[in-house]
Amino acid sequence: MPIVAPDGGGEGAPAVLILTGSVGAGHDGAAHELARRLRDRGVDVDVRDYLQALPRWFRFFLREGYTASVQRIPAAFQWLFDSIEHSRWVRGAVILSCHLGDRRVHRWTRAKRYGTVVSTYPLASQTLGTLRTRGQVTVPAVTYLTDPAAHKTWVHRGIDVHLTVTTATAEHGEAVYGFPMHAAGPLVPPRFAAGPGPARLAALREELGIPGDRPVALLVSGSLGLGDLDETSRVVQQVGLVPLVLCGRNAALRRRLSGIPGVIACGWRDDVHELMHLADVLVHNAGGLSFTEALVAGLPAVSYRCIAGHGRANAAVLEAAGGAPWARTADELTRALLEQSARPRTGAPQGDPADHIVTLLAATARAARPNVRPAA
């Protein structure tokens, strides 16, 4: 796609527009961390929720329909996920639905002198790619894949650059879809890499009621508290680990797990970065932001009882790349917990997606400069 000077209103250096999606916390988390890093570099950044570009009924369908289908009728969500990948008709219907956001997203891109537009949400990437293909967006369009597994909703021929968290995702996406992908690194706040001191860890153990010498398994289910963690908690206890469960905003899940002796069930917490340094192993069921946070914290992970659709796809990519074993049974979970909890912590992955965006901004700025011949 050609890059031309941004023609929106405003003066000064080109800004960046980031499109996120308020379904769960993963897409928002990546968007706001990218915005923070760019602002630290002096870049003007705006973050927009793609769902606000859609009709209210479709917004409700995406938010509530996602939660309800994953939790209550996972087979239906798995069918939709697979059909988008393999059925032209279903994929076409999804893309047609994304056109509902074209007009407002186009208006957003022209509200300021943007030099790059970035998406951290797959459906926003479809709309952005369409606008770029039509020539309605004339500056670089970027997709940042927050999931370990690429999917057809994440890729579009109109997107100039596809960025991923890890090399495993980049290799998977290139092999399956043929689009060049670049492993840019995680978008997680730096506090996840810097662990708290011994005094703080001891205070956390006391607060949560964890004996000082007991190893801990941190069980996560996303901000929505999706999945069945009852059996997982029991297996964790049988292995000799303390199950510390983050239930997100799912109060019912927290109440239910709190009734199981030995399980420490927590609601929404702002100290997850500290809990990841308190724990010895992570058990996840989706592979989204929580896994990326654990990656930065160096916390070994296990995939188990993964939610339908992207949860299972993510687990498959992570397992194939050696990032996290995927336990399908309680016996496999037992072995994986023993192996992973004994592993030493790893260093945080290198790379910063903000560097890629700054490079694109520089290219846009060069395109905006007039060609001036030196005086004879």
Image (cartoon, grey):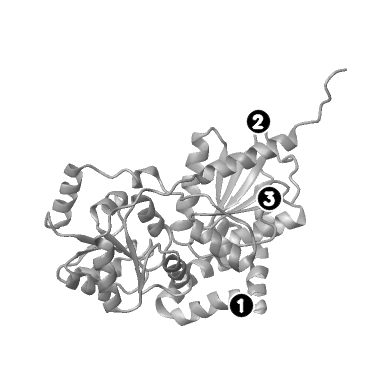
Residue corresponding to mark 3: 107
Q: Residues within 10 Å of mark 3 (few under 14, many from 20)?
A: few
Which callout, 3 or 1, points to the residue nearer the camera? Answer: 1
Q: Residues within 10 Å of mark 1 (few under 14, many from 20)?
A: few
Q: Earlier in the sequence, mark 3 or mark 1?
A: 1
Q: Which mark is residue 12?
A: 2
Query: Is residue 97 found left or right of 227 in the rendered image?
Result: right
Q: Is residue 259 visible?
A: no
Which residue type carries mark 3?
Arg
Which callout, 2 or 1, points to the residue nearer the camera? Answer: 1
Q: Earlier in the sequence, mark 2 or mark 3?
A: 2
Which residue type carries mark 1?
His
Kindly indicate whether the residue at mark 1 contacts the one at mark 3 (C-beta within 8 angstroms).
Answer: no
Q: Secondary structure at mark 3?
A: helix
Q: Is residue 349 visible?
A: yes
Query: Is residue 27 found left or right of 86 in the rendered image?
Result: left
Q: Earlier in the sequence, mark 2 or mark 1?
A: 2
Residue 179 image offset from top left, x and y in percent: 64, 60
Q: Quadrant of the C terminus?
A: top right
Residue 170 image offset from top left, x and y in percent: 55, 59
Residue at 27% from the left image edge and 78% from the top image edge: 331
The residues bearing labels 2 and 3 have C-alpha atoms spaced at a distance of 20 Å
Q: Secondary structure at mark 1?
A: helix
Q: Which mark is residue 86?
A: 1
